[in-house]
Structures are given as C-alpha cells and as structure tokens.
Image: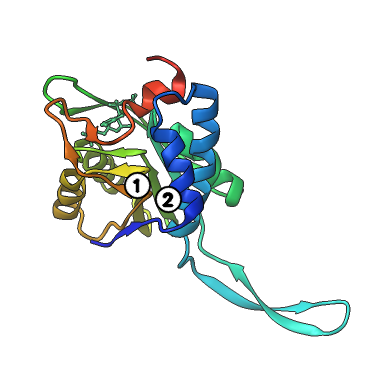
Amino acid sequence: MTLTVLDHPLAADLLARLRDERTPPDLFRTLTRRLGWLLVLEATRDLATDPIDVPTPLETTSGQVITERLVAIPVLRAGLGLLDAATDLYPDTVVGYLGMERDEITLQPRDYYAKLPPMEGRRALVLDPMLATGGSGTAAVTHIKANAGPKSISFVCVVAAPEGVKRLAADHPEVPVFTAALDRQLNDQGFILPGLGDFGDRLHGTV
Ligand code: PRP
Ligand code: URA
C-alpha cells in the first residue's frame, strides 16, 4: 500500500488551524474545504489523459484532456467536509454516500446508509477525514468493492493514525492512502493523538 503525506506549507498551515481547538465550525468547514483541494489534487495526480491538438490564436499545439472520471464517496458525516473539494476540482464527478458510525465503546463501525451510483471505469475517492483504528475506512472500501466495482479506489483523509494505516494496508493493500498528516497513536478511546478531536462534531457544530 502506498501512503502519501502532503508536503506543502499551505497544507501544514491549514492543518495547524484545523487542529486548534479554538477554531469555530464555520472556519473549520472553510479550512477543510481548502485542505480538501490539496488532498484531492494529490490523489488525482496520475489521472489518465489523452493528447489533443489545441488551436491557439497563433498556431496549433498539443495539450492533454482528462479521460478518467471520478466517483467521490464521502463517509457520513465527517466526509461531507471534503466533498466540495472533489466536485469543485472535477465538476463531472458523480457522488455516492456511505453512512458509518463508530460505536464509542467498542470502536466498531456500524453502517447505516449506502447510496452508491454505477462506478464502472471510474476512480473512487473515499473521503473520510479521520483514519483512526481503520475500522470505518476498511468497512467503507469493502462495501464499495462488494456493491459496485469502480476501476480503482483511493482513500483520502486529513489525519491518519499508524493503527488505521496498518489496518487498511492489511485489508486492502491495493488502496493508496492520501493524508495531510500521519499522527503518533490512538488513545484509549480511539482518538488520534495529537489529532484534532471529533471531526464530525467540529465540522457540524455538534460538540
Ligand atoms: C469518525 C470518522 C471516521 C471514523 C474513524 O466518524 O469520520 O469515519 O470516526 O474512526 P475509525 O478509523 O476508528 O473507524 P464517526 O464514527 O465519529 O462519525 P461522524 O462522522 O458521524 O461523526
Ligand atoms: N474520529 C474522529 O473524529 N477523531 C478521532 O480522533 C478518531 C476518530
């Protein structure tokens, strides 16, 4: 499995402000969307293209058009924060939804909603900001593989824990992970350290 950690001052700046507990939900949403652009750009760096001829006002030159289409799949609720980044950058992206809720005690994911479009030939971007134990992430990928076969699947998150990366690599070794940070560890409640707290609550103002 490949793990790509964003290496850009803008990503570092946005992440630092997301981590800050004083950041209110309206700003948290804006920062998430902006960081999402960087993550989605990185996750689509190798999209397939075809060469084309482009008539400039002066002469004809060569260019590239993207031929590979996307399906963005935010994992509810927190993944909604990254969805606009995918559709801003690639307006012809189709969107599917997966609802996953992690039990606070057992840390096991419960999947409560799924609405996936046809995905043949598309690259699926699974959008879930926190890869903690990896339970939700691996369940999301399993669900997508079982129900609708995209051409490939990439996992896009904001913060990953080593435990989650290990779990995803074991269960779905072909799925690359793109993140803004690989943090230190999980605490006893399954929260990422240093992390940024409960992403879904901070994004939706439900703390
Ligand atoms: C969060 C997060 C992931 C999951 C990660 O969702 O968005 O889906 O936890 O934890 P894991 O890797 O240990 O499974 P949560 O269950 O809090 O739901 P929410 O997005 O609705 O707040
Ligand atoms: N989910 C979150 O929102 N935050 C964590 O630190 C772990 C799981």
Q: Residue at x 31, y 27 (%)?
A: 197
Q: Residue at x 53, y 39 (%)?
A: 33
Foreground of the two, 143 or 128: 128
Q: Amino acid at mark 2?
A: Met
Quadrant in the rendering for residue 132: top left
Find residue 148 and name its label: 1
Q: Amino acid at mark 1?
A: Ala
Label 1: state its secondary structure: loop
Residue matched to label 2: 119
Q: In the picture shown, does residue 83 fall above or below 181?
A: above
Label 2: state its secondary structure: loop
Direction top: furthest residue: 206
Q: Position of residue 126 (x, y in %)?
A: 37, 45
Classify residue 200 as left or right of residue 101: right
Q: Residue at x 48, y 42 (%)?
A: 14
Q: In the picture shown, does residue 3 fall above or below 144?
A: below
Foreground of the two, 107 or 189: 189
